[in-house]
Amino acid sequence: MAQSHFLLFLLLGSLSAFLLRTSYAHKDHVVGGGFGWKIPPNATFYKEWAATKTFVAGDKLMFLYRTSAENVLEVSAQDYENCGNSEIVEIYYRGPSTVQLSTPGPHFFYSGIGLHCEAGQKLAVNVITTAPPPPFVADDSLYSIGGLEIFTAPSPSPLRATASASLADTRRYVAPAVVAALFGGYLLEALGM
């Protein structure tokens, strides 16, 4: 019986770790933010906007514009560069338009109205397969699970004076496996096992 609980705990712990590591909520990116999709104030406006974003397969681009006032053309790289129309992938003309970024790689868009593309109303995005992991920040943060206080272990630092650590400054360091064991114990108790 104890062995089956241990195996269940290992399975749940492994599954939880996997799901936490690989979970990513797809995002809806409003192109241009609050400015929307219209002739930009400068020719690099949409390029600068895209530079601050990460686009992952499954994300959506939301082009906010009024029908008949604007449109969105998805085009080839060559058409994007010269505002041409020889290789149009898709035309969106009912605003607002939502484009699903389903394939990784570069995607190119521009407005097909008048000289809007030449004025800088165009967008290039590079779509990646999976989201990068969030940056890891090592610190002495205090975490609490239930009533148990848990400190993360500080990263080794040459500036940290280890010889002067006093007994009053000593903290309990709990490994992630122990935290998982506590969580698993609560889970098993809740399931009545």
Image (spheres, rainbow, N blue to C red):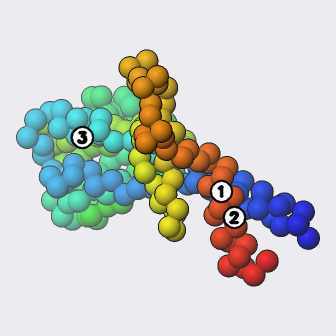
Element assignment for label 1:
helix
Q: CA distance from mark 3 to mark 2?
A: 44 Å
Disc 2 target residue: 184
Q: Residue 155, image x and y in percent?
A: 48, 31
- Judge from the rendering whether residue 72 lies leftward or rightward of residue 87; answer left or right: left
User: Regarding mark 2 in the picture, which secondary structure is present there?
Assistant: helix
Residue 55 visible to the viewer: no
Q: Residue furthest bottom?
A: 192
Instruction: Name the amino acid, label 3.
Output: Trp
**Which amino acid type is marked by label 2?**
Gly
Quadrant where the N terminus sits is bottom right
Residue in the image at 23% along x and 59% along y = 64
Q: Please rate how many residues cluster around mark 2, counting C-alpha atoms within 10 Å: few if below 14, some from 14 to 19, many from 20.
A: some
Residue 33 spot, x, y in % from top left: 21, 52
C-alpha span from label 3 to label 1: 40 Å
Residue farthest to the top, as pictured: 158
Check if mark 2's residue and mark 1's residue have beta carbons within 8 Å. yes
Residue at left 47%, top 39%?
Answer: 167
**Mark 3 or mark 1: which is in front?**
1
Q: Residue at x 43, y 42 (%)?
A: 168
Can the viewer see residue 10 in this picture?
yes
